[in-house]
Image (cartoon, rainbow, N blue to C red):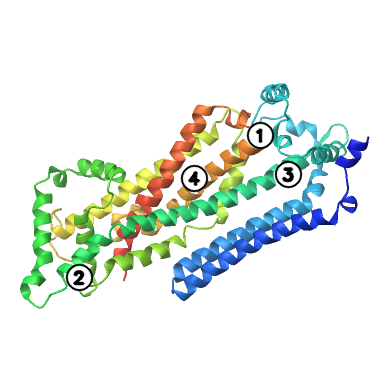
């Protein structure tokens, strides 16, 4: 009895130093995070990085939204757990696992001396409290619409989702900037060639290089075969996605289209463009939240929805990447006068190179790819943390490994290849 009394010690009987210590830890950690974000925002403001500053603001809004959802769950958990509905509504097929699977997991976990699901990570007094809340909630023949335990699990999912998505957003920007910075050496070489442009000979250097490039492309059978061009564009995603000749050709075309100096820093322009695009692919929009809700609704037992949905991002990455490669190839070949169009030295970017004549369609697709990859990883961590490695959610370990590999591969390709390609293929329209 004395042990039970200690386990159910109320706040009134808890030493003040214990309460103060826990509160101090939470306050200090929160202040460190808040001050770090504030300093980052101040630095971006001082360096006039307005697009990145806007992206940071959107991430702060996302944190505030997820924090509000978490607070709302905490404040209304007991009320929601007291909403009872007839048990017959739970007898349908809208469940992620079957009763035999749950019973089998319970037996396995009991044999190993531990409890199922979140009970394995909660202290004994809290487990007793949650058990009591669930047992006292509804009358016979009725069940809570969502138990107090499951609300706590949902609370933890919000936390995992926030951490994963923001981490993935930062990783996306880092990989994309690293990729574009690898083009800096080409920009420096191009500007060095144009440094002394007092003679006509120096003015003709880029044209002679372009002519050499044209002769090289003309000798290739790919120019005359549309299918081979598409195949080449598809597989170029797995290597250096942008060749030096492509970059120099697009750079020259952009400069001539806008009547700029040959010493114009096209690379810095690309960096600014990437930062502007980044602020449009961070955050969680209403449709993406709708996707999360729909996914949870239709993730019923036997559907293998987690596996099939993991194929969507990598498929979209490959399709979008191949299309962007084709756009760049078309522009460079046209600039070189090799595609049967009128031979011009000016770059001719146009909407009909893109699907439905809408270049802006690619960015929402990239946004969805990045969000889905974050959602995939967050779901895996959440299932593992809350339900265990042998739970029915992730029981098929081969499928889990395939999902994770596809997710990481899609994230890397999208960040390191597709997003820089999008900036290069679309930003040549503007100045």
Label 3 or label 2, whichever comes before in sequence order? 3
- Of labels 4 and 2, earlier in sequence is 2
State how far apart marks 4 and 2 are (Cα): 39 Å
How many other residues sit within 10 Å of disc 2, few (<14), some (14-19) or many (≥20)?
some
Among the 4 quarters of the image, the one containing residue 262: bottom left
Q: Which of label 3 and label 2 is nearer to you?
A: 3
Residue with the most extreme bottom position: 198
Residue 256 position within the rendered picture, expressed as x and y whole percent measured from the top left: 20, 70
Name the mark nearer the viewer: 1 or 2. 1
Quick check: can you spot residue 237? Answer: yes
Q: Which mark is residue 151?
A: 3
Give the SS element for disc 1.
helix
Q: Measure the alpha-carbon separation of dots 1 and 2.
A: 60 Å
Alpha-carbon distance for marks 4 and 3?
A: 24 Å
Label 3 environment density (alpha carbons within 10 Å; few <14, some 14–19, many ≥20): some
Lower sequence index among marks 1 and 4:
4
In the rendered image, the quadrant that contains the N terminus is top right
Circle 1 is placed at which residue position?
A: 387
Residue 146 seen by the camera: no
Q: Nearer the viewer, mark 4 or mark 2?
A: 4
Look at 42% across and 43% down and name the residue there: 410
Residue drawn at (50%, 67%), measured in percent from left and top? 54
Residue at the disc numbered 2: 256
Tell me the SS state at disc 4. helix
Determine the CA span between mark 1 and mark 4.
21 Å
- Label number found at residue 373: 4
Q: Quadrant of residue 49?
A: bottom left
């Amino acid at each position: 009895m004395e042990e039970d009394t200690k386990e159910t010690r109320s706040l009134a009987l808890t030493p003040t130093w214990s309460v103060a210590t826990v509160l101090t830890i939470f306050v200090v950690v929160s202040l460190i995070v808040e001050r770090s974000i504030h300093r980052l925002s101040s630095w971006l403001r001082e360096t006039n990085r307005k697009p990145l500053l806007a992206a940071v603001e959107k991430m702060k809004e996302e944190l505030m939204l997820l924090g509000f959802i978490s607070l709302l769950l905490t404040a209304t958990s007991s009320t929601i757990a007291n909403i009872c509905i007839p048990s017959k509504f739970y007898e349908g097929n809208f469940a992620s696992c079957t009763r035999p699977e749950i019973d089998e997991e319970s037996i396995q976990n009991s044999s190993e001396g531990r409890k199922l699901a979140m009970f394995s990570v909660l202290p004994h007094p809290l487990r007793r409290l949650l058990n009591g809340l669930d047992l006292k909630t509804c009358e016979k023949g009725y069940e809570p619409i969502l138990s107090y335990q499951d609300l706590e699990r949902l609370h933890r999912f919000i936390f995992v989702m926030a951490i994963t998505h923001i981490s993935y957003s930062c990783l996306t920007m880092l990989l994309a900037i690293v990729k574009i910075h690898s083009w800096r050496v080409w920009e420096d070489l191009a500007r060095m060639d144009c440094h002394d442009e007092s003679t006509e000979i120096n003015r003709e250097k880029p044209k002679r290089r372009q002519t050499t490039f044209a002769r090289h492309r003309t000798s290739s059978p790919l120019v005359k075969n549309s299918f081979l061009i598409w195949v080449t564009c598809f597989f170029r995603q797995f290597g250096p996605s942008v060749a030096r000749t492509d970059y120099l050709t697009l750079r020259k075309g952009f400069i001539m289209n806008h009547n700029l100096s040959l010493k114009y820093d096209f690379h810095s322009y690309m960096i600014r463009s990437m930062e502007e695009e980044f602020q449009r692919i961070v955050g969680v929009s209403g449709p993406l939240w709708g996707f999360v809700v729909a996914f949870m609704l239709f993730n019923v037992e036997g559907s293998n929805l987690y596996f099939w949905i993991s194929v969507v991002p990598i498929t979209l990455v490959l399709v979008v990447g191949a299309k962007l490669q084709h756009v760049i190839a078309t522009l460079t070949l046209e600039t070189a006068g090799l595609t049967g169009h009128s031979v011009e030295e000016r770059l001719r970017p146009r909407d009909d190179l893109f699907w439905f004549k809408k270049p802006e369609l690619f960015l929402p697709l990239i946004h969805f790819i990045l969000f889905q990859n974050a959602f995939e990883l967050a779901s895996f961590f959440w299932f593992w943390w809350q339900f265990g490695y042998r739970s029915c959610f992730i029981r098929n370990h081969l499928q889990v490994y395939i999902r994770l590999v596809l997710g990481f591969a899609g994230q890397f390709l999208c960040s390191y290849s597709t997003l820089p390609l999008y900036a290069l293929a679309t930003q040549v329209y503007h100045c």
